Amino acid sequence: MGDHYADRLNAAILARRTAAIVGIDPVYDRLPASLRPEVVDLPAAVAAIETFGRGVIEVVAPLVPAVKINSGFFEAFYELGVAVYYRLVAYAHERSLLVIGDVKRGDIGSTARLYACGHLAQPAFAEVDPTRLPDAVTLAGYLGENAVGPFIEHARALGKGLYVLVRPSDPGADAVHEFGETRHFYEHMAELVNEWGSDAALRGVCGLSCVGAVVAPKDAASTARLRTALPVTPFLVPGYGAQGATAAACRPCFRAGGDGAVINASRSVIYAFDNPRYRERCGDDWQAAIALACRDFAADVAQVAYGREP
């Protein structure tokens, strides 16, 4: 692989003309009816999840630079689901997409090294296809530098990336991240992420680090302060669409030149076939509905970041 993650992501963004990415978080009960068999057992459910995931990847690949695949939605199907997660990572790579593995790992150093081996490092076994591992992962950095360090080592060596949780989008997380009267916890996390990722050796030609941050746009002023506090940190921005954030709310996440962030949408895109706006135009063609929703999302983000349509 070799090339710096942020440089590869920036090139993909320029090629697709948008910083929009699609999250793949499949829930069996929300799949198109045509994919759900009448008799459901574990293999049948897993097959449906994989068919849906591949179908989503197929239609969004020409439109966005990357997908974010959430491992938790596959771990719910035990070992068969975990295998599908890795196969979908490889399939997305076949379709020329970058992949963010939304794994949110975070543990003490000895355990973190093994998590890094399973999710980011060059495979130790010849039988393992390296394309089954994502280009970047999400992490919880609450156990400190030793929990993040192994991932940084592999990212630097292999041209990969990581995004550390700084400010999640879920309102329930506010009790933790908004804690503090003069200084919030998310501001402390931002300071740590900046410290961990600001070394020049971790930056690509574009000036961005391989160490990124998950930053939800709660309000313009505080988001702008985080952007200032993290000048070389790429942002992964959740909350668009189903969680209520608009593309305009995400504007402060970008650097002055329109780079430095990717905006993720999951449910509002992958379940577009349930949205009357798209169902009216596409009928039962669930892939067509997803493609239309993805085009609208990509255009929305491009307009905010660059002031133009993709």
Image (cartoon, rainbow, N blue to C red):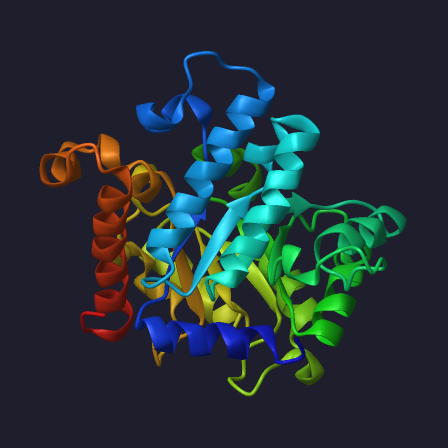
Q: Residue 190 lies in what quarter of the image? A: bottom right
Where on the picture, by quarter, is residue 161? bottom right
Q: Residue furthest right?
A: 110
Q: Quadrant of the N terminus?
A: bottom right
281 with respect to 298 (left or right)? left
Foreground residue among 258 and 71: 71
- The x, y position of residue 95, in whole percent, is 46, 62
Farthest residue, direction left:
280
Name the residue rendered at 32%, 26% in the picture.
Answer: 34
Classify 212 as above or below 217: below
| Residue closer to the observer: 61 or 13 | 61
Question: In front: 182, or 216?
Answer: 216
Q: What residue is at 50 percent from the left and 56 percent from the top?
A: 92
Q: Position of residue 39 (x, y in %)?
A: 47, 11
On screen, residue 3 above or below 227? below
Q: Is residue 142 left or right of residue 282?
A: right
Report if residue 232 is visible in the image: no
Q: Residue at x 30, y 73 (%)?
A: 17
- Residue lying farthest to the top in this orientation: 39
Residue 78 seen in the current view: yes
Horizontal and vertical percent position of residue 145: 78, 59
